[in-house]
Amino acid sequence: MNAPSPASVASAGPADRYLIANATSDETTVLLNREFERRGWPARALPGDWRGLLMSVPDQTASLLLIADLCDVENPAQAFDEIAAGCPDGASVIVIGDRNDARLCRSLLAAGADDYLVAPVREEDLTDAIESVLAMDSNLVARARPDKPSDRARIIAVTGARGGVGATTVAVNLAWLLAHEQSRRVAIVDLDLGYGTVALSLDLEAGRGLEEALANPERIDGLFLDRAMVKSSDRLAVLGGGETDTADIYDATGLRALLEQLSGQVDDIIIDLPRQGRVLRDAGLAVADRSLIVSDLTIAGLRDSVRLIRMAADRGAGSVDVVVNRQGARRRGEMPLKTFVKGIGREPVACLAEDVRIAEAGMAGAPIARQSGGRKSLLRFRHLITALSPVAAPVSRGLFGLGRVKPA
Ligand SMILES: Nc1ncnc2c1ncn2[C@@H]1O[C@H](COP(=O)(O)OP(=O)(O)OP(=O)(O)O)[C@@H](O)[C@H]1O
Ligand SMILES: [Mg+2]
């Protein structure tokens, strides 16, 4: 195969990637080059059809990212097969096409494409697609070195299957108990940037440190984090949950840098992960050692839990568990626990009942452990912590290749 064009060489993010792209229109050329420039990658899109891509594939590069513009191609599936045959194993391919055709999209994904974007491609969709590939990179790097001893934080991502099922409640109570009953140093990162309620749940005023960190990854260091974290106690701190709409942060580089830095400063990082905002959500799932999906016992909760379990697995998340919450909240419209368990295909790691004490604690900005009453719920939360302990369920993944988690 021919030598690569120097203009198409790039070093991209957490793992080095050799990047090659073609573009069949001025619009796509501008879009791709703007994205590469924004990321500080030297690569530029090669003008012309996809055959030019194959001319540029290096002989020996496992870590290849190809962006193939297949617009105006009569048979994109066949072109993709030729591209795949010309790429080394381990290459990732993002396809751009001009057909909004679900069947074509499915067949390309089944054939090994990482993503299919329909032209004219939206900037955030391109960013999402690249971020997903990079998120997989950091997982693969991490998995390749599972046993390197290190002292980094355990990361637990908590996501609600539906709005209001109690994801934040679970995240906050988990964090509080780890900090105050297990003597762990804990940080909760509230990735619901505009509307997060973690700070509120602990009667704190949210700071803007998380937004600043996500927007300026290069500024993140120990001192920056120290200032950015809002402290609930000397063992428990909160990042994020501000009140401004920062939906335009769709690059996960800042999140990775933040978690990496934070990882050296605390024992546990609990991420309150919103369902919306694919980039941060995917990145959160990808780096988590454990993912908790919180659901109620409704049919919608079941459907979305199944969807999230699959999504978390696709994103390379560590072990994924379901927490049932608010059991008994609705006399009607609630399925028996057994039916739910059958539907999700696994036993929930914890099952919490609807409990007025939990609601009262939430309103008072306090964890259930600080509430008089609510003993049964408190016990369930304690059991959840035991179930999540690395001793009970060994976790061998690592963040950014840093290795083992701090023992609980
Ligand atoms: N087991 C429970 N019993 C009673 N009330 C609960 C329980 N769990 C959560 N709640 C209450 O339900 C409300 C929603 O909880 P929470 O904010 O944790 O949900 P969420 O899934 O994070 O919601 P959102 O989708 O808005 O982020 C809160 O008022 C909380 O106190
Ligand atoms: Mg919430």
Image (cartoon, rainbow, N blue to C red):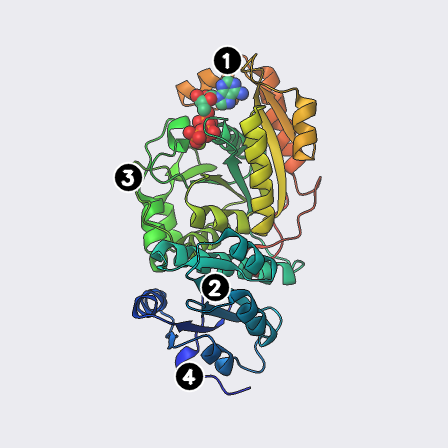
Residue assigned mark 3: 244
In this figure, which residue is indicated by the disc labeled 2? Answer: 95
Q: Amino acid at mark 1?
A: Val
Q: Amino acid at mark 4?
A: Pro
Could you say which is closer to the camera, residue 396 or residue 235? 396
Quarter of the picture containing the N terminus is: bottom right
Instruction: Please tell me which residue is depicted at 53% across the width and 47% down the height of the picture.
Output: 285
Expressed as whole percent of the image width and height from the top left, the position of residue 156 reads 55, 42
User: Which numbered mark, 2 or 1, is in the foreground of this view?
Assistant: 2
Residue 207, x across and y down, in percent: 32, 39
Nearest to the eye among marks 3 and 4: give it.
Answer: 4
**Disc 2 or 1, which lies upstream in sequence?**
2
C-alpha distance separating marks 4 and 2: 22 Å
Residue 203 locus on image (x, y percent): 37, 26
- The residue beneath circle 4 is 6
Classed neighbour count for the residue bearing mark 4: other residues with Cα under 10 Å, few (<14), some (14–19), many (≥20): few
Whole-angstrom CA distance, mark 1 to mark 3, is 31 Å
Q: Earlier in the sequence, mark 1 or mark 3?
A: 3
Of the two numbered discs 1 and 4 on the same chain, state the one appearing first in sequence. 4
